[in-house]
Amino acid sequence: MKVVAERPILLRALAHVQSVVERRNTIPILANVLLRARDGALELTATDMEIALAERLPADIKRSGAATVPAATLYEIVRKLPEGAQIELDHPGGDAPLGLRAGRFSTSMNCLPVEDFPVMAEGSLPHRFVVPALSLRAMIDRTRFAISTEETRYYLNGIYLHEASSEGARVLRAVATDGHRLARVEEPLPEGAEKIPGVIVPRKTVLEVRKLADETTEPVTIALSDTKISFELDAGRIRLVSKLIDGTFPDYERVIPRDNDKLLRVNKREFAEAVDRVAAISSERSRPVKLALEKDALTLSAASPEMGSASEQLNEHLSYDATPLEIGFQARYLRDITDQIAGEDSNVEFRFADGTMPTVVRQEGDTSALYVLMPMRV
């Protein structure tokens, strides 16, 4: 293999594939990226056996062939080369090292056999549909904060993607929950997504796809089966294939309250900043904040045995006309949800039942996203 590539193009592709590589693994070949030069393009592939990412980039192919080299090392070398460098990769085959040259710089990297590089079979992916990149980013951004990191409940370690009905229309719905908060986001159902199975997309896959979607304005093609999902970006130039979580997502509809009749409407920015200020008194990870509500007034307070207490009253840009109520939440959870509300001067709607039951949170005027937050004792 012998190929010449532009540094910025190669660096961008290496940034994508090296983040898929699992740093801590017992199989040396999984730390490598597969470089394959053919058909006028250089293809880079990396996998951790759960996810495989392949990216094709234009290059001057002098000699077809393939090699595998350590992904992180190659990325660091290319990253430190000067802007605008022309990078030559030369591998004569066999057990020989890969040579890299750029201007006066040259290095060689030991290779592992190409035939040892694992191929992740994807099988048939019968369901195929297209989602705008902006819509995909929004679905991920508004749900990923609620993905559980608890290994024992592995079926919560991802986003549940499925077809659903909402107010008489069919929608593509994404749901995530860690048992303390729940996020549910909807987009109009794309053509081809009818009758897709409900699938749980793993956290790592979600994060990798989000990074890739951030760099494109073109629609993203999604294909899936009961066990695998693929994402194609940049007209198929980038392709990520992932295993799905083999588990049953809980019946989340059961935990969404339907009869919460106490409505607080408050300015997003003013509320979020007040939460931050009162929570600063406590160094605890959970940082509980108490909300005391009465007619058109909200008092936020927090206390710490070591530090003291803090409180702030809000009585402008809010409305509350129900019976007085006291309820507590983790400050971080409140901020995670208010961060999903678009626009600094938007209003957040909290619907309460009492001080012990789950609370429903939405952005005023936006029916596409719903959040549920469990209270805590304060």
Image (tube, rainbow, N blue to C red):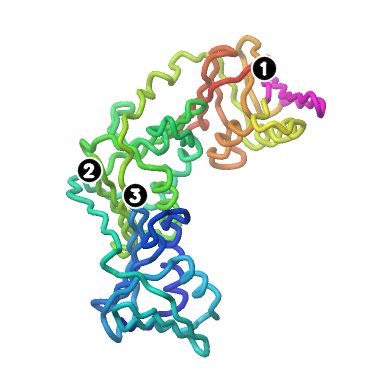
User: Within 10 Å of the Cα at label 1, are there few (<14), some (14-19), or many (20+) other Cα atoms?
Assistant: many
Secondary element at image label 1? strand
Disc 1 to disc 3, C-alpha distance: 48 Å
Q: Main secondary structure of the magenta part?
A: strand
Q: Does the rendering let one see residue 212?
A: yes
- The tag earlier along the polypeptide, 1 or 3, is 3
Looking at this view, is 266 or 327 the one in front? Answer: 327
Q: Amino acid at mark 2?
A: Ser
**267 relative position to 306: left or right:** left
* Distance between mark 2 and mark 1 Cα atoms: 48 Å
Residue ID for mark 1 = 293
Specify the quadrant of the image occupied by residue 319.
top right
Give the image location of residue 240, x and y in percent.
33, 55
**Which-is-in-front pick, marks 1 and 3?**
3
Residue at 27% x, 43% y: name it.
190
**Viewer-closest of 285 and 298:** 285
Residue topped by disc 3? 50
Can you say whether 297 is above or below 195 in the image?
Answer: above
Q: Which residues are magenta?
A: 289-314
Question: x%, y% of residue 318?
Answer: 65, 26
Query: Where is mark 2, residue-wise?
Result: 225
Residue 274, compared with residue 115, is above or below; it is above
The earlier-in-sequence mark between 2 and 3 is 3
